[in-house]
């Protein structure tokens, strides 16, 4: 059993080390990348602590204790900051976010350090009298922050429909998998903690179960995440809530009525003549350049004139193109999925989902209905 646990812990140490090296080797590093380095280092410290405990390495265990203890007060707000740093361009973001780490700071100074230096003092017992189970508090604290991080991510994802035509399949959805995976780890730890409290037992091996789930999450995320460079170097920046409101208020009066028709002509030309929507990488900047206008003006055009998002506007043309191809003989030499990719959709799943949303039927069902109508005529 010890050999199995040892193998799992060594695997976790290697995975977290590879993750740190993978991020550090990126040519461009900004705030999100540095936050990830800190995150993976903390994960490495947790695993190293359990490895030291397993092999009774007192010195290593003592050193790692300072990083492992209270890490559940540190990692969740750190990942919340990671999500914000990706989507919000603010040089003072770190300074403004220090308040999220106050709980960890107080806990570290008033509990972690005293417990490591004088573990049997009355001071520590006084803490345990008022808060008998710190693990429960840490788990609840962490889960709340992970939920806040997911809420922020989903909110930003909706905003990004204003700039990207294939947002659902963009590589940064790794963030969602990343957050959910580690949220599950915390939930597992919470269940273990509540079980211990309910049945009144306390064992040393329960922490290894949580670490096992954490390493499983790392294995799931590691290769997938590190291969997606755009996760770490996003090509977009979303404004803060206040800035977004101000910008929307400005855009409400940005376009003159006399500009509407000219912009419609340019847009229709890019869509119907150039068929720019066939590119799966089409975004607001590319279309703005093609129309010879600024991104701000194009964004205002969609909100004021088209009354739909850039994402929905582009995919509307893609669906119509797909419908045309599904009615033609092209379908005989292309798969249904191939037709979707030809029309600019980035994957089979996005093609089927968006097509069904627009037509109330799948591409295959639509093709069959077309064939049925042709046989009747």
Image: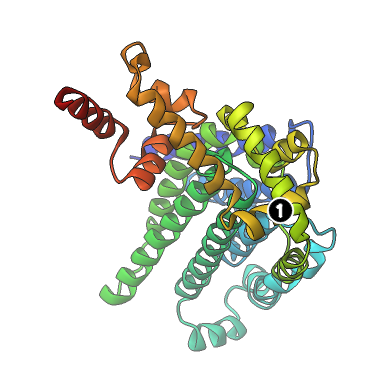
Please indicate whether residue 34 sits to the left or right of residue 2 in the image.
Answer: right
Q: Position of residue 235 (x, y in %)?
A: 72, 41
Q: Position of residue 119 (x, y in %)?
A: 59, 73
Residue depicted at x 61% and y 43%: 164
Q: Does residue 377 lie above or below 235 as drawn?
A: above
Q: Does residue 373 lie above or below 186 as drawn?
A: above
Quadrant housing the C terminus: top left
Q: Position of residue 347 (x, y in %)?
A: 45, 31
Please indicate whether residue 104 sits to the left or right of residue 326 in the image.
Answer: right
- Camera sees residue 366: yes
Q: Image quarter for residue 371?
A: top left
Name of the residue lying farthest toward the top: 333
Residue carrying label 1: 260
Residue depicted at x 45% and y 50%: 181
Q: Image quarter for residue 328?
A: top left
- Camera sees residue 227: no
Name of the residue lying farthest toward the left: 376
Residue depicted at x 45% and y 60%: 186
Quadrant housing the N terminus: top left
Task: Please tell me how many numbered marks the rendered image carries.
Answer: 1
Front position in the image: 179 or 357: 357
Please indicate whether residue 12 sits to the left or right of residue 242 in the image.
Answer: left
Q: Does residue 214 lie above or below 373 as drawn?
A: below
Residue depicted at x 58% and y 49%: 43
Front position in the image: 78 or 280: 280
Q: Secondary structure at mark 1?
A: helix
Q: How is the image coloured?
A: rainbow
Q: Does residue 148 lie above or below 111 as drawn?
A: above
Alpha-carbon neighbours of circle 1 within 10 Å: few (<14), some, or many (≥20)?
A: some
Q: Position of residue 276 (x, y in %)?
A: 62, 30
Please indicate whether residue 12 sits to the left or right of residue 101 in the image.
Answer: left
């Amino acid at each position: 059993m010890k050999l199995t646990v040892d193998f799992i812990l060594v695997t976790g140490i290697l995975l977290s080390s590879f993750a740190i090296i993978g991020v550090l080797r990126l040519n461009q590093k900004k705030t999100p990348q540095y936050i990830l380095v800190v995150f993976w280092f903390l994960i490495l410290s947790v695993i190293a602590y359990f490895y030291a405990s397993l092999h009774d390495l007192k010195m290593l265990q003592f050193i790692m204790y300072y990083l492992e203890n209270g890490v559940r007060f540190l990692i969740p707000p750190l990942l919340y900051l990671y999500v914000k740093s990706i989507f919000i361009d603010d040089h003072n973001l770190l300074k403004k976010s220090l308040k999220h780490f106050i709980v960890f700071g107080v806990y570290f100074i008033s509990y972690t350090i005293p417990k490591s230096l004088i573990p049997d003092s009355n001071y520590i017992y006084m803490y345990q009298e008022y808060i008998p189970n710190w693990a429960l508090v840490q788990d609840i604290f962490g889960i709340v922050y992970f939920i806040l991080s997911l809420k922020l991510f989903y909110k930003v994802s909706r905003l990004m429909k204003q700039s990207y035509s294939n947002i659902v399949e963009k590589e940064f959805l790794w963030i969602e998998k990343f957050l959910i995976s580690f949220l599950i780890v915390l939930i597992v730890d919470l269940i273990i903690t509540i079980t211990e409290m309910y049945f009144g037992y306390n064992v040393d091996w329960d922490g290894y179960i949580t670490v096992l789930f954490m390493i499983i999450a790392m294995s799931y995320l590691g290769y997938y995440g590190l291969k997606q460079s755009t996760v770490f170097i996003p090509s977009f920046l979303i404004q803060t809530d206040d800035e977004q409101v101000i910008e929307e208020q400005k855009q409400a009066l940005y376009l003159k009525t006399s500009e509407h028709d000219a912009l419609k002509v340019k847009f229709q030309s890019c869509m119907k003549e150039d068929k720019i929507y066939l590119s799966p990488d089409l975004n607001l900047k590319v279309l703005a350049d093609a129309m010879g206008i600024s991104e701000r003006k194009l964004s205002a055009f969609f909100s004021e004139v088209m009354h739909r998002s850039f994402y929905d506007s582009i995919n509307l043309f893609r669906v119509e193109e797909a419908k045309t191809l599904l009615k033609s003989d092209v379908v005989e030499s292309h798969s249904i999925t191939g037709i979707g990719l030809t029309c600019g959709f980035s994957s089979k799943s996005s093609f089927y989902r968006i097509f069904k949303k627009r037509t109330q039927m799948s591409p295959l069902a639509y093709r069959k209905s077309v064939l049925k109508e042709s046989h009747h005529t």
